[in-house]
Amino acid sequence: MGSLSEDARNRARTRLDSAEFAESRKAALEGLRDDPNDVELLILAGRAGLEVGAEDAVDQLRRATELSPGNAATWHHLGEALATEGRTDEADAAFRRAVELDPDNQVALTHLGHTSLATGRKDEGVGYLARAASIAGSASTAAISLVDMYRSFGQYEQALEQAQRLTDAAPDDILAWLDVAELSLQVGRLDDASDAFERLRDIEDVPGREAYPLHGMIQVEIRRPRWADARQLAEQAAAIDPHGLTTDLASFLEAQISGPGEEPAPTVAEVESALADSLAAYRRMAQEGRQLGGGQRVG
């Protein structure tokens, strides 16, 4: 029985690592027929089953925690499965147990931070994410989550401070610099925002996308307000403008510099909204690029 279980574990583990989830689950279930209490096989079956939508995935992972209640990994995997099914309170309890057993597991701490926030325990969530970030480093998933969390609470200064740490740890990370740029705008640090958008122009290597940082720099000059500088930037963006903003920007800026013309120009609010939409599109593209390429942020 031992050799059969070992063979099943090896096959299930190899298939899981190769993202062959159906085959991994099949191998694990074959092993469980011979040894139904094999904890690793239960974990492998549950993890692979979760990927293919098997109804018994959570039950297998819960059984693993019953057989090995002192194993932090089993609780962590159970928490992930429960979170995937939207069972946040149960996931929170599983992650909490994982952290009790392994206090330095930054991935479990990050998950516990998120479930704490989702269940209304803001201070606890912040504490867990901060602990995870201190363990994993400034470019970790936990550190990224702290930026998003502080921003969602309207704590823009704290979000900016965290985002700046990310740029120190990952100096070519587009999303980190975009966070710094937008948060600097939010708190009125216009010079810092301009510098961050300029940095984005330097590190952006996708043809055409350099227009997006230019739109951010235009937004800075509108806030100052320095209309001639904004117009100069708009002229630079004209040849590479993927968002079709150039005409509206030119009309708006000309009205600010020379006075109203015969045709009504866009309002400040309309231009700001269009520029914000441009940066939101830029953020989506950067996020998609990180997901496809594996990204620079880790942990």
Image (cartoon, rainbow, N blue to C red):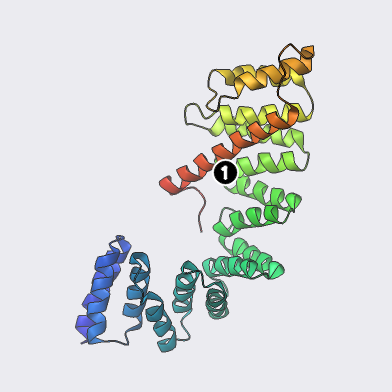
Q: Nearer the viewer, residue 53 or 69?
A: 53
In which quadrant is the N terminus drawn?
bottom left
Residue 186 is at least partly visible in this image: yes
**Dot 1 alpha-carbon crowd within 10 angstroms: few under 14, some 14 to 19, many 20 or more:** many
Horizontal side, residue 228 vs residue 210: left or right: right
User: Which residue is at a point 31% across and 65% down the rendered structure image?
Assistant: 16
Residue 102 lies, in percent from the top left, at 54, 77
Residue bearing the label numbered 1: 175
* Tally of numbered discs: 1
User: Which residue is at a point 78% across and 12% down the rendered structure image?
Assistant: 258
Q: Amino acid at mark 1?
A: Leu
Residue 232 lies, in percent from the top left, at 67, 17
Q: Nearer the viewer, residue 181 or 88?
A: 88
Residue 233 is at least partly visible in this image: no
Q: Is residue 245 above or below residue 136?
A: above
Horizontal side, residue 149 vs residue 105: left or right: right
Quarter-of-image position of residue 28: bottom left
